[in-house]
Image (tube, grey):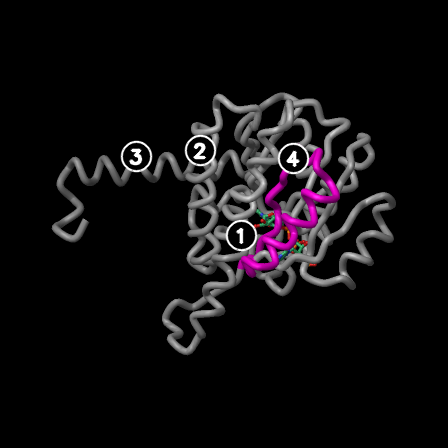
Amino acid sequence: MDMTGNTILITGGTSGIGKALAAQLLALGNTVIITGRTQARLDAARADLPGVHCFVCDQSDPDAIARLHDDMVHSFPDLNMLINNAGIGLKRNLNDASVPIEDLEREIRTNLIGPIQLNHQFLPTLKRQKAAAIVNVTSGLAFVPLALKPLYSATKVAMHSYSMTLRAQLARSSVRVFELAPPATDTEFNKGQEDMNTANRMSPEKVAEAAIRGMEQDRDEILPGQARALRLMGRLRAKMVLAQAAAGKMGEAG
Ligand SMILES: NC(=O)c1ccc[n+]([C@@H]2O[C@H](COP(=O)([O-])OP(=O)(O)OC[C@H]3O[C@@H](n4cnc5c(N)ncnc54)[C@H](OP(=O)(O)O)[C@@H]3O)[C@@H](O)[C@H]2O)c1
């Protein structure tokens, strides 16, 4: 994919990987639009990213996504790339029955239902372009779940599966589907979680560089740093589970 001269919507561009992608894609001569939940954080990002366009959109709210779509197709009819980057990943205790269901839903809507709605709404616009792309940002945890972040891990494995099927269904269209699965990255996402895997976090700038290089090389799945090792671990574990089942070690409950 040619990574210059595109019109690119990046969800969640106010910090971390989204902001690093926005900076590097602007420098390559693309038109870049970012979203975030608040005007204040978008204004702060705009101060660091001259030329970027901003829209407030909380993608856990389907009506906000519909409004973003209407505004975008009017203002940027040439949109040819959608980067589904916005996400949250919360530590959760699934034994805690006092957590409101709305709180659980918000994480799933932000990470999974929001991107699916965004793709659904923007696909007609993307398909009209000569060359277009959807980039779904998943995680190394799409391959190996982390017990401390159960809903997050579940949304990312679902996005991984959905990215494969979306790619298959769009194979005859002008729209490529990339998956970017970052490893642990040094962003606000991990704020307050310094106890978890602090060493070896990648910088968001390096993740963005790897993402752009991967798209230039038309690599469907881009796995910077330790994400590749996590995918290998996931495959080995699946093989072990299947081997145990074949050896009759799973019991009736399997
Ligand atoms: N950091 C890691 O270790 C890591 C590892 C693997 C994958 N990832 C993935 O990488 C992506 C980016 O994360 P990051 O590490 O760059 O984290 P980050 O610095 O916290 O950035 C997250 C971005 O998402 C936006 N956002 C959050 N909820 C939103 C909502 N409901 N609607 C719209 N925007 C929303 C935030 O904007 P506002 O706060 O301004 O609304 C912010 O711009 C996520 O999908 C994450 O799952 C991160």
Q: CA distance from mark 1 to mark 4?
A: 16 Å
Mark 2 crowdedness (10 Å alpha carbons): few <14, some 14-19, many ≥20: some
Q: Considering only order in the chain, which callout, 4 or 1, is on the residue closer to the N terminus?
A: 4
Residue 59 in the image, given as x and y percentages of width and height = 59, 56
* Disc nearest the viewer among 1 and 2: 1
- Numbered disc 4: secondary structure: strand
**N-term-proximal mark, 1 vs 2:** 1
Earlier-in-chain disc, 3 versus 2? 2
- Helix, strand or loop status at disc 1: helix
In the image shown, does 93 or 5 lie closer to the viewer?
5
**Location of mark 2 (residue):** 164
Which residues fall within the magenta stretch? 60-89
Residue at 69% over, 56% down: 36
| Quadrant in the rendering for residue 204 | top right
According to the image, label 4 marks what residue?
81
| Marks 3, 1: nearer the viewer | 1
Residue receiving disc 1:
114
Say which residue label 3 marks. Answer: 239
Whichever of labels 4 and 2 marks the residue nearer the N terminus, that label is 4
Q: Indicate the amino acid at tag 3.
A: Lys
User: Would you identify the image quadrant in which residue 31 lies?
Assistant: top right
Position in image of residue 152 (x %, y %): 48, 55
